[in-house]
Amino acid sequence: MSFEEGLFFYLDNYAGLSAEIDDRLYPLLLPQGATLPAVVYRRISTPRMLELENSFLPHPRFQFDCFAGSFPRAKAVAEQVRLALDLYRGAMGEYTVQTVIIEDEMDIYEPETKIWHSIVDAVIWYEE
């Protein structure tokens, strides 16, 4: 199982987020014609820090794009992503997460599509 699969499983089963988006959690791209609200996640980078035991501890940055038809709904979805992840410690699939740090949040309106878009950036420190 990849780390992304573990992350997907964790978020897909987080009750607050599931209540907002049902099963509309997608990797990389929002499918054309997708029902909103929905969340798209993508790995932005994966730096690795050398630990004392000469092992490398990955801490990838993930971006979570929360799409909705209104600003309050996009913010509500983003808040559930934040609540699911911020300072989380525990299992994500077969990986052990040491901590998750929310590093940035941003809001966008896309006038061409009339879609509100809230972004949550998180750095996830986990053991391989």
Image (spheres, rainbow, N blue to C red):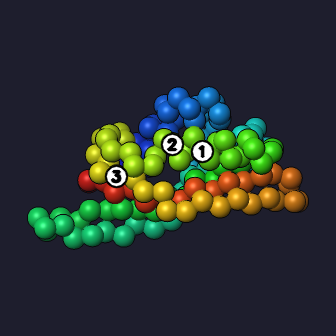
Tell how many labels: 3
Q: What residue does disc 1 label?
A: 79
Q: What residue does disc 3 label?
A: 99
- Residue 51 x %, y %: 18, 67
Q: Are marks 1 and 2 in contact (CB under 8 Å)?
A: yes
Q: CA distance from mark 1 to mark 2?
A: 6 Å
Badge 1: few (under 14), some or many (20 or more) residues near its Cα, within 10 Å? some
Badge 3: few (under 14), some or many (20 or more) residues near its Cα, within 10 Å? some
Which numbered disc, 1 or 3, marks the residue that appears first in the sequence?
1
Q: What residue does disc 2 label?
A: 83
Q: Amino acid at mark 3?
A: Thr
Q: Amino acid at mark 1?
A: Glu
Badge 2: few (under 14), some or many (20 or more) residues near its Cα, within 10 Å? some
Which numbered disc, 3 or 2, marks the residue that appears first in the sequence?
2
- Residue 13 x %, y %: 49, 31
Instruction: Give me the residue at 26% from left, 53% from top.
Output: 127
Instruction: Give me the residue at 38% from left, 45% from top.
Output: 88
Q: CA distance from mark 3 to mark 2?
A: 13 Å
Q: Amino acid at mark 2?
A: Leu
Q: CA distance from mark 1 to mark 3?
A: 18 Å
- Residue 47 x %, y %: 36, 70
- Along the line of sight, the residue nearer the viewer: 53 or 100: 100
Where disc 2 sits, the SS reads helix
Where disc 1 sits, the SS reads helix
Tell me, yes or no, if residue 60 can be seen here.
yes
